[in-house]
Image (cartoon, grey):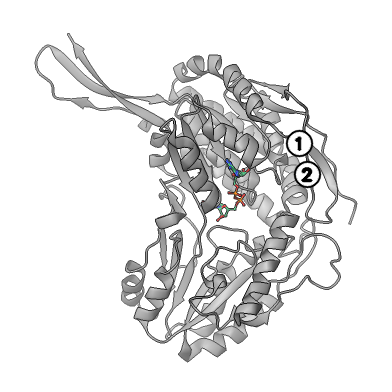
Amino acid sequence: MAGLRSFPTVEGIFVAGNWEPLHASDRIESISPIDGTVIGHIAAAKEIDVDRAVRMIEPTLAPWAALGAARRAQLLKDFAAAILARADDLIEAEIVDAGLTRRTAVNDIQASIASIDLFVSYAPTLTGSTFSSPAGTMAYTVREPYGIVARIVPFNHPLMFAVQSAAPVLLAGNAVIIKPAEQTSLSALILADISKDVFPPGVFNVITGFGHEAGAAIAAHPAIRRIGFTGSVPTGGRLLELGAKHIKNVTLELGGKNPLVVTEDVAPDAVAAAAVSGMNFTHAGQSCQSTTRLLLPTAIYDDVIDRIVDRVGRLVIGDPREDATDIGPLAYQAHYDRVRNYIAVGHDEGARLVAGGRRPAGFDQGYYLQPTVFADVAPDMRIANEEIFGPVLAIMPYSDTDEAITIANQTEYGLICRVLAGTLGQAMEIGGRIKAGTLYVNSTGRRIRGMPFGGTKASGLGKQSCLEEVLSYTEEKSVVVGL
Ligand code: NAD
C-alpha cells in the first residue's frame, strides 16, 4: 500500500470561529497505529488557553440561544450535509489516525449523520409547561440553555462521538467545546474546519490537549457548568471530583465488562456467531458495548469454544485501509501495551489461551494483535472483572442459571447485557435479574436509535442518544407572572 497520508500541523485550538494560538506553544504528536509513524501534530492546550477560550466564546452565547430551536435544527442539517461533503477526508483521518477499518469508518460517518437526524427531529419538543394558578397570575416553565457545554470524548470512535455529542448540545441552544482524545484528535480538527462555514463563530469549538491538562482545566472551569463525558470509569470519577466545587451537572458514559449469557438449548453455532460478533473484534474489541465475558453452560462448553476458535481464525487482520481487512490495529502504543499486559495477566492467572494472544505474523510495525480468546476463566480473575477494551474474550463456565446471574452481576460495571436462551420466557427471566443499562434478549442486534443509552452501577450517570439527552442540556426555569 502507499505511504501514510500526513496531516498539517495545527498550532492552535479552534475557538470562536478561528484557530487561536496557544499562550505557550506546545504540541502533541499524532501517531498512526498502522506503522507507528508521526502523521501530524496537534496543539496541547493548558488551563490558561481554556480560560481564554471561555472568555472568547461567552459573547457569542446570547445570539445563538435567541435563534430558536427550528433555526438551530436547520443549521445542524447543514452541518450534516457539510460532513458528508468532506466524508473522504474524515474517513481517511479515522483510518490513519485511529486505526478504524474502512468499513467501520464509513459506518461511523453514517452513524454521525443519523445522530444529527435524530436530534434535529426533537426540535419541536423543546417545550415548557403551563400550570394552573390563581386568577391574576400565570405560571409556566421555559427551557434555557446552560451556556458553554463541554463534551469530552474518548479515542475509539473519534468522529462519531464528536458529532453525536455536539448535536444535542447545540440544538438545545448551548455552545459546545469538543475535547477529543489526545491520541485521535485529527477528525475533530477537520470537523472544526467544516463547522466554520455552517455555524456562527463561537458555537462549535474544539480544544485539543492532554486529558490531565486541557481536559481537567475544562472540567474545573467555573463558567463551563455542564459536562458530558464519554470515557473510562477512573476519568469519570475524576470529573465528578473536579466538578464538585462548582456543583456542575455531569453526565458520564463509561466503560463496561458486558456479559453474554447463553443457555444450553441454544445451537452452539449460533452462540459462537453471537460471541464473535458481540466482541466487536472488527474494531479490535475497542467498543464499550463488546460482550467480553461469555458465560457458557458446561453441556455445550467445548463445542462452542471449538466453533469460536474456528470463527476468529477466519477473521482477516490487516492494514485498515484495505477493503478486505476485518481487524485493524489498536489505536495507540500505550493502549496496545496495556491490552498485551492483560493477556500476560490471563496467562499468569491460569486461564487457558485457546486463540490468539500474539502480534500476528508479518506485522512487525503498528499495534496489531490477534483476536484473543481465554477459556476456563474463573470469576475471581482480573480478566473476568476489569475492562480490557481490546480484542480479548473471557469464556467462563457455569453449571446453573443462578450461578450465571451471580457471575454476570459481579463486576462494578453495568453497561449492556445480552442473553440468548432456548425460550423467550427463560431469556427474559435471566435478563431481568442482571443489572445493565441496556438488555438484549434473544437478539444479536445493535442499538435502536432514539432509545436511551447509558450505564448503571459504575458504567455511568444519565442517558444519551434520546430526547432525555437533549432536555438534559437545558435548565427548566419556573416563571410566575402577575397579570
Ligand atoms: P479516558 O477516560 O482515558 O479518556 C477519555 C477522554 O477524557 C479523553 O478525551 C481524555 O483526554 C480525557 N481525560 C483524561 N483524563 C482527564 C482528566 N483528568 N480530566 C478531564 N479529561 C480527561 O478514556 P479512553 O481510553 O479515551 O476511552 C476508553 C473508555 O471509554 C473505555 O472505558 C470505554 O468503555 C469508554 N467508552 C464508553 C462509551 C459509552 O457510551 N458508555 C463509549 C465509548 C467508550
Say which quadrant the N terminus sits in.
bottom right
On the image, the x and y values in percent for residue 52 come to 63, 20
Q: CA distance from mark 1 to mark 2?
A: 7 Å
Residue at the extreme top: 483
Pick the front one: 231 or 480: 231
Question: What kind of residue is marked 2?
Answer: Ser
Q: Are marks 1 and 2 in contact (CB under 8 Å)?
A: yes
Say which quadrant the C terminus sits in.
top left
Task: Tell me the residue at 71%/76% (across/down).
Answer: 356
Q: Is residue 256 visible?
A: yes
Task: Tell me the residue at 63%/63% (across/down).
Answer: 285
Quick one: label 1, few (<14), some, or many (20+) residues within 10 Å?
Answer: many
Quick one: label 2, few (<14), some, or many (20+) residues within 10 Å?
Answer: many
On the image, the x and y values in percent for residue 225 come to 46, 29
Q: Which residue is mark 2?
A: 30
Pick the front one: 137 or 412: 412
Instruction: Answer above or below: position of 222 versus 398.
Output: above
Q: Which mark is residue 179?
A: none
In the image, 145: left or right of 322?
A: left
Q: Which of the 4 image quarters holds residue 359?
A: bottom right
Number of numbered discs visible in the structure rendering: 2
Q: Secondary structure at mark 1?
A: strand
Task: Tell me the residue at 74%/60% (across/down).
Answer: 329
Q: Which residue is mark 1?
A: 42
Q: Earlier in the sequence, mark 1 or mark 2?
A: 2
Q: Secondary structure at mark 2?
A: strand
